[in-house]
Image: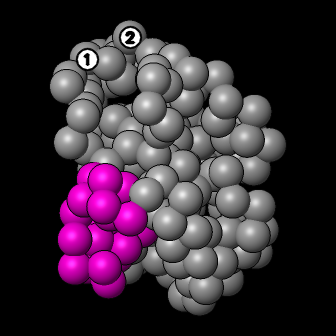
Amino acid sequence: MDNIILIGMPGCGKSTLGVVLARKLGYGYLDTDSFISQREKSTLQDIIDKRGLNYFLDIESSVGSEIVCDRVIIATGGSMIMSEKAMDNLKLLGKVIYINVPIDELKRRLGNFSDRGIAMKNGETLEDILKKRTPYYNKYADLVVDYKDGNSLEETVNDIIEHL
């Protein structure tokens, strides 16, 4: 199958890059966070607050492991990387691209992220999550795209296409 799967921390630009990449390549587009939100008829933050973090992670894993598509850009939720079942399926579907953005830039982009629906335990920081997830991002990535200060969205999309 000929898909492109974007992984990375919340705020790294997976959704924004995914939409532009899909348009440029003539692919479909799937944002797994939006899919989960629509399926559950609730925001990600409400799911986490009302049903719990483990419930959300189970749904995310289930969604990731059940995707079947062709010629689609898939922007995953930042925590989907923690599900081996989901990532094994996504690896079979296509190329996995890790959008690597430094912590300071993530913090700048996210600002107050308390209502963003980030899968994190009480007391965890963005640094804690990055430290925990980075080995998984690197494990599953076929390609790592490092953030370049000053690069436009278009330049980043062109970098991705060039490396594919």
Give the magenta range. 32-51
Residue 128 visible in this rendered orientation of the protein: yes
Query: Is residue 119 or residue 163 the one in the foreground?
Result: 119
Res 149 quadrant in image: top left
User: Which residue is rendered at x = 54% and y = 49% of the image?
Assistant: 79
Amino acid type at image mark 2: Asp
Q: Residue at x 55, y 29 (%)?
A: 129
Q: Which residue is mark 2?
A: 104
Colour treatment of the image: one colour
The answer for how far apart the CA atoms under marks 2 and 1 are is 6 Å
Looking at the image, is 129 positioned above or below residue 140? above
Please state the horizontal and vertical placement of residue 76, each as a whole percent of the image.
48, 59
Q: Is residue 99 magenta?
A: no
Taking 43 as reference, is 131 above or below it? above
- Read off the residue under disc 1: 108
Secondary structure mainly formed by the magenta segment: helix
Residue 27 percent across, percent down from the top left: 40, 76
